[in-house]
Image (tube, grey):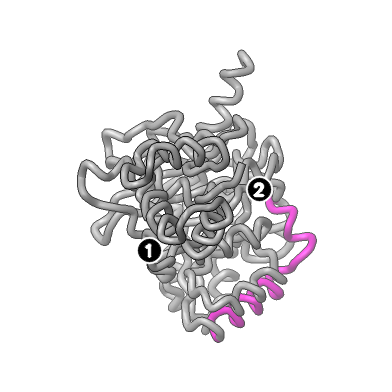
Amino acid sequence: MTELTGMTCDEITTWVKDQGYPAFRGKQIFRWIHQGADFEEMTNLPAAMRGKLQQEAVAQPVSIRLQRKSPLDGTVKFLYALKDGNCVEGVLMRYKYGVSLCISTQVGCRMGCRFCASTLEGRVRDLTAGEMLGEVLCANRYLSPEDIRVSHVVLMGSGEPLDNYDNVIRFLRLLREEEGIRLSIRNVSLSTCGIVPKMYQLAEENLPVTLCVSLHASNDEIRKMTMPVAYTWSIPEILEACRNYIRKTGRRVIFEYALSDGVNAGEEQAKELASILRGMQCHVNLIPLNIVEERDMKGISEDKVRRFLKILQDNNISATRRREMGDDIEGACGQLRRKTINSSKGE
């Protein structure tokens, strides 16, 4: 089956012509798809054509299997169903500047970070560009009664975006298609654990996304305790790739730093982090560790978070404590999917 969601307007037009239909049908179908419509809703297409399309193509490869809304802050956690029976997660968050959607880029993850639930079963498969776009289209449909749409996208759900590089790049280009949802690439954030060669490649794509690096340590010894990727690329190599990205795009880099008591959250680590980031166009996003039942890492007190933050700020490092959203609905990536999988197994 041809997945139309992952195709540009020109590609769909070519495909439609190959099926024996007029070229103008391609643009009609593309517009419908980017409204989140399936074939039966495409009312300006002949019924016979809609029937044939349903047999030969997929308009919407993603659907919402489960949703949970936080009564505390309005955050919505989606469990998305894929056509092959797999599922991934997304989180819809409301801010003063708009609506942000955190999407997944892979089913599971193979990076093995100790603090993350997404990687516990490893990587099952990559998501296609069409499936990633499908996550956004589902969220837009959910928001349609309010006459609003997703304004910001964060590639920070399950999966390592740069480990699914080609599909992610195609997805980013689809976001700004003229006849599509036309979401500004500057409103997209992409999170990576630090796959250095792909960071350099991304800098050459003319896609000025906000690059977010999951650093989580002030030196390589600590990073190796929690992130296997640290055995392949060192912090100095990652920071040089970040500097290159800043030079190429003019965008500042965001460093994600999950604080774990007794691991990376002491005053010594705060001073060391300030030292290695000094002079860089960047921002540090401090995240009190979200406890994963299957992991042995500890959370941290608010007092220790404040002390760590103050040391960074006193050393002229732009930093904030990340606002926690969706904690009451298992907002962190991987948790809802894992619980659903275990329930289906009868665990």
Q: Who's the residue at 60% across and 22% down the image?
A: 342
Instruction: Indicate left or right for 43 with 127 as reference.
Output: left
Determine the residue located farthest toward the right in the rendered image: 231
Front residue (pair 132, 41):
41
Residue drawn at (48%, 66%) of the image: 284
Which residue is disc 2 drawn over?
Answer: 126
CA distance for labels 2 and 1 = 26 Å
Dot 1, crowdedness within 10 Å: few (<14), some or many (≥20)? some
Q: Which residues are magenta?
A: 226-247
| CB within 8 Å, label 2 to label 1 | no
Splitting the image into 4 quarters, where does residue 275 fall? bottom right
Secondary structure mostly seen in the magenta stretch: helix
Nearer to me, 242 or 80? 80
Q: Which mark is residue 179?
A: 1
Task: Quadrant for the C terminus, please.
Answer: top right
Q: Nearer the viewer, mark 2 or mark 1?
A: 1
For the residue pair 295 and 316, the one nearer the viewer reads as: 295
Q: Is residue 315 left or right of residue 46?
A: right
Amino acid, disc 1: Glu
The disc at residue 339 is none
> Residue 321: in sight, yes or no?
no
Residue found at the very far left of the displayed protein: 146
Q: Is residue 241 magenta?
A: yes
Q: Image point 67% across, 71% down: which residue?
A: 238
Q: Amino acid at mark 2?
A: Asp
| Image x and y of residue 172, in percent | 51, 63
The x and y percentages for residue 297 are 61, 41
Q: Quadrant of the N terminus?
A: top right
Label 1 residue SS: loop
Location of residue 60 with respect to 232 vertically, above or below = above
Answer whether residue 302 is magenta in the image. no
